[in-house]
Image (spheres, rainbow, N blue to C red):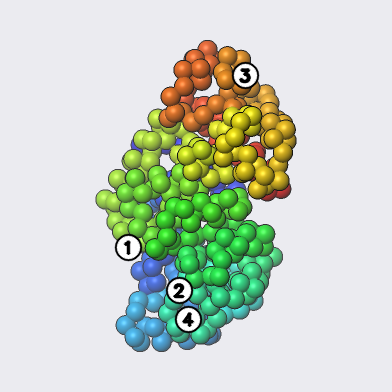
């Protein structure tokens, strides 16, 4: 099923909103190539890249854990990256570093054809002792310096975290976005979509949700509360990935915006402002606007500017005179549907246009 998800990370087009997450000693270029038909990102690693983390990896290897210990790291990574790119997947390398300079040096060697993922996720003690993995979640200032070192090199940066380890995941996500991180890859562990929604409402950073997301129902729940992508590790087999892809693609064909949020009045995240009515009565919209220091009149202006010159400017017979104030396609509404028919707009196109409105609103809010 050939589906266009209109999905980009930076300037890199990503063909599906499904990623394979790294598993130490297991996920390499060949692993990703064998699953390439159904994924958009292939995250390989984790790779220890300097003396302290390589030493830690050797200790873990001696204890029986799978680890990547190539003789020549740069040459090995170049080969792995080439395999993944040839398979039509965007390559991501998950890296374990003990200092910011190691990341910058590697980025100078490999360039910007790959996304660099900082491993702030590993909980093995030797790696923590090497100032990597979960050490970074307890020392966010160090993690921020790692992000900045990679951004100075001019590359796209992902940060892999485990939820509930940092003092405040929401604040950490905001700091990472401010520091220039492009992607936040979150292992949600024992947390659910409510934790994800709090992070989504903090910044426009690209979010990959991870851990146990192996069914369409679970994926849809994550998409509806802020995830841009989902990732799979242990269950990244062809059957699971192909089923997920087919179901997400079918939903997108029918409804357009593949990760559309729930409406705000039903627990949706900040992106759902695209579906909100005019702020003329008590509802969840008013405290949300107050939280972002936006007046009702400013919100009306923002929405009308976002829809100017688009088909959603129409809709004179809808509740508020424009489709910009209309609800999600799955909510029954004869006025919206009549306006769409009159304008010759399919519901899937309507939702794609709502997605563009959401992007414009978030750009204003998080400018």
Residue at mark 4 to residue at mark 2: CA–CA distance: 7 Å
- Which sits earlier in the primary sequence, circle 1 or circle 3? 1
Does residue 179 appear in this view?
Answer: yes
Taking the spot 36% from the left edge, 61% from the top edge, the residue there is 233
Residue at mark 1 to residue at mark 3: CA–CA distance: 50 Å
Dot 2: few (<14), some (14–19), or many (≥20) neighbours within 10 Å?
Answer: many
- Which sits earlier in the primary sequence, circle 4 or circle 2? 2
Residue at mark 4 to residue at mark 1: CA–CA distance: 21 Å
Is 263 located above or below residue 135 in the figure? above
* Percent position of residue 117, x then y: 53, 64
- Is residue 203 rendered to the left or right of residue 212? right
Circle 1 — which element? loop
* Percent position of residue 359, x then y: 61, 40
Foreground residue among 184 and 115: 184
Q: Residue furthest front?
A: 282
- Which sits earlier in the primary sequence, circle 4 or circle 3? 4
The residue identified by callout 3 is: 321
The residue identified by callout 1 is: 234
Circle 3 — which element? loop
Quarter of the picture containing the N terminus is top left
* Percent position of residue 343, x then y: 55, 15
Circle 2 — which element? loop
- Which sits earlier in the primary sequence, circle 2 or circle 3? 2
- Mark 4 vs 2: CB contact within 8 A: yes
User: Mark 2 or 3, which is nearer the eye?
Assistant: 3
User: Mark 1 or 3, which is nearer the eye?
Assistant: 3
Taking the spot 73% from the left edge, 35% from the top edge, the residue there is 298
Residue at mark 2 to residue at mark 1: CA–CA distance: 15 Å
- Which sits earlier in the primary sequence, circle 4 or circle 1? 4
């Amino acid at each position: 099923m050939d589906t266009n998800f209109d999905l980009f990370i930076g300037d890199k087009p990503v063909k599906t909103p499904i990623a394979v997450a790294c598993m130490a000693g297991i996920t390499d270029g060949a692993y990703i190539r064998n699953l390439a038909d159904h994924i958009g990102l292939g995250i390989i690693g984790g790779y220890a890249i300097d003396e302290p983390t390589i030493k830690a990896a050797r200790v873990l290897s001696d204890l029986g854990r799978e680890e990547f210990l190539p003789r020549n790291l740069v040459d090995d990574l170049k080969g792995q990256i080439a395999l993944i790119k040839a398979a039509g997947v965007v390559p991501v390398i998950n890296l374990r570093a003990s200092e910011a300079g190691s990341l910058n040096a590697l980025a100078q060697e490999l360039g910007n054809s790959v996304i660099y993922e900082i491993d702030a996720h590993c909980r093995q003690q030797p790696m923590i002792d090497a100032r990597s993995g979960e050490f970074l979640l307890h020392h966010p200032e160090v993690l921020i310096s790692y992000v900045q070192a990679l951004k100075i090199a001019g590359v796209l940066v992902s940060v892999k975290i485990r939820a509930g380890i940092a003092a405040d995941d929401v604040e950490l996500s905001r700091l990472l976005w401010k520091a220039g991180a492009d992607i936040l890859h979150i292992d949600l562990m024992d947390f659910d979509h409510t934790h994800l929604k709090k992070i989504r409402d903090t910044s426009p950073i690209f979010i990959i949700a991870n851990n146990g997301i192996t069914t369409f129902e679970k994926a849809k729940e994550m998409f509806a509360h802020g995830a841009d992508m989902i990732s799979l590790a242990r269950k990244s087999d062809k059957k699971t990935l192909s089923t997920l892809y087919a179901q997400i693609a079918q939903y997108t064909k029918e409804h357009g915006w593949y990760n559309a949020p729930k409406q705000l009045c039903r627990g949706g995240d900040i992106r759902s402002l695209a579906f909100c009515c005019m702020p003329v009565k008590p509802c969840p919209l008013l405290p949300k606007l107050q939280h972002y220091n936006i007046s009702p009149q400013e919100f009306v202006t923002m929405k009308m500017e976002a829809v100017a010159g688009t088909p959603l400017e129409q809709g004179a017979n809808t509740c508020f005179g424009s489709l910009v104030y209309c609800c999600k396609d799955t909510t029954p509404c004869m006025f919206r549907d009549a306006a769409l028919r009159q304008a010759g707009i399919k519901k899937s196109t309507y939702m794609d246009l709502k997605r563009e409105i959401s992007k414009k609103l978030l750009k204003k809010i998080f400018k």
